[in-house]
């Protein structure tokens, strides 16, 4: 879990990069920006709000040979070793970004390099290095009194409600390439920020594994269980899957398949499906991992437990008491009407 509300901006440096392929220049500020009480909370919200609102998928710096040859990894390490070097390192980071700005679609813009303290990640208070870029400017009106009239003045500037690009490099898991969160709202060249500038890949922690494996189960339920069985069994398969994750601290695939899949014929189907779809979720070779409880809770909220019928009737199954659906809901076929039906047993109707 991540908590950014208590974060504090220790320093901020502001530079500007142009598009190198169009021979636009780079501008490096001589000194760090002097923060004030008016700007600091606005900038903090501008930089950190997108990371509070997005799903947590951590990345890590990667290099084909060794991380010692990874430029951003080395620059981040330099800052974490001595935060007083942040401004000088920010110039190197901006130059590195400028060198990657060769695609004709890449916009020029301001680069902000911040050193944060008091961020909380996995219940641990840590520092972080933030690199952000604003690309798109918006029109806005200023008003000025001129004599007896109020004049409108058209201005251009940055919309503080939308950050274009950004990353937070947390000072944890250094040996693995740090834990990193990143966003890119303006995908003019999707490889520019993530691959060329940051050069990162997915950080395969328990949160990632749990979310992706449950997502694979959800796709399997829709693509295989529903056509092979029915909608009720699709819902119940996902119910059993989530409950397995909820009651175990460690995931073990063989145990999972034996407990969750009622129809033994579907077990090889699941393994084949995982081999086919696994690369999409980067879990094709994963069979054991620690389970992240927070990811299970989030997944449970998103999984639908409703059977929608073409007769404008809905049947909602209870994920908290799954045995009820197994014991008290039956599906059948009515020869006279030539229609399917669900038979629901109960003792009395509950008050709303």
Image: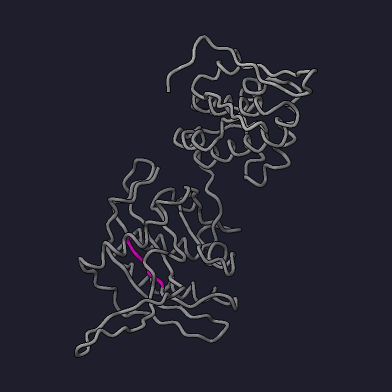
Query: Can you say which quadrant of the picture contains the C terminus?
Result: top left
- Give me the residue at 56% from left, 54% from top: 201
Image coords of residue 182 (percent x, y): 47, 57
Q: Is residue 243 above or below residue 298?
A: above
Image coords of residue 154 (percent x, y): 36, 83
Image coords of residue 319 (percent x, y): 52, 25
- Give me the residue at 58% from left, 76% from top: 105
Q: Say left or right for 165 vs 336.
A: left
Residue farthest toward the bottom in the current orientation of the protein: 147
- Give me the residue at 51% from left, 76% from top: 107
Which picture quadrant has residue 146?
Answer: bottom left
Residue farthest toward the top in the current orientation of the protein: 347
Q: Is residue 134 above or below residue 153?
A: above
Q: Please tell me whether residue 112 belongs to the stretch shown in magenta.
A: yes
Q: Which residues are magenta?
A: 111-115
Q: Say left or right for 135 vs 86.
A: right
* Pick the front one: 160 or 190: 160
Q: Is residue 215 above or below residue 197?
A: above
Q: Say left or right for 230 vs 249.
A: right
Image coords of residue 152 (percent x, y): 31, 83
Query: Can you say which quadrant of the picture contains the N terminus?
Result: top left
* Pick the front one: 90 or 207: 207
* Pick the front one: 295 or 321: 321
């Amino acid at each position: 879990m991540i908590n950014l509300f208590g974060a504090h901006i220790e320093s901020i440096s502001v530079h500007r990069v142009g598009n190198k392929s169009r021979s636009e220049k780079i501008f490096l500020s001589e000194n760090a920006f002097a923060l004030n009480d008016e700007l600091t909370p606005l900038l903090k919200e501008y930089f950190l709000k997108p990371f509070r609102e997005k799903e947590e998928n951590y990345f890590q710096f990667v290099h084909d040979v060794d991380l010692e040859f990874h430029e951003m990894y080395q620059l981040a390490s330099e800052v974490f070793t001595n935060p007083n070097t942040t401004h000088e390192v920010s110039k190197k980071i901006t130059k590195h970004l400028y060198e990657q700005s060769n695609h004709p679609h890449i916009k020029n813009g301001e680069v902000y390099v911040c050193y944060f303290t008091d961020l909380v990640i996995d219940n641990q208070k840590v520092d972080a290095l933030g690199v952000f870029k604003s690309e798109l400017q918006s029109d806005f009106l200023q008003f000025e009194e001129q004599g007896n009239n109020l004049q409108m003045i058209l201005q251009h500037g940055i919309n503080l409600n939308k950050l274009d690009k950004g990353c937070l490099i947390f000072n944890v898991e250094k040996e693995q390439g740090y834990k990193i969160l990143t966003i890119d709202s303006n995908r003019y060249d999707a490889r520019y920020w993530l691959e060329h500038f940051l050069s990162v890949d997915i950080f395969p922690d328990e949160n990632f594994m749990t979310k992706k494996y449950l997502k694979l189960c959800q796709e399997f339920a829709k693509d295989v269980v529903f056509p092979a069985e029915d909608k009720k069994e699709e819902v119940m398969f996902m119910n059993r899957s989530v409950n397995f994750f909820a009651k175990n601290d460690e995931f073990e695939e063989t145990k999972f398949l034996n407990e969750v899949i009622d129809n033994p014929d579907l077990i090889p189907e699941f393994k084949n499906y995982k081999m086919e779809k696994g690369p999409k979720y980067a879990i094709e070779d994963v069979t054991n991992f620690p389970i992240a409880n927070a990811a299970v809770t989030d997944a449970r909220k998103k999984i639908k437990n409703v059977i929608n019928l073409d007769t404008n009737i809905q049947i909602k199954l209870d994920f908290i008491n799954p045995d009820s659906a197994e014991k008290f809901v039956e599906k059948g076929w009515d020869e006279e009407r030539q229609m399917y039906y669900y038979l629901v047993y109960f003792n009395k109707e509950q008050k709303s």
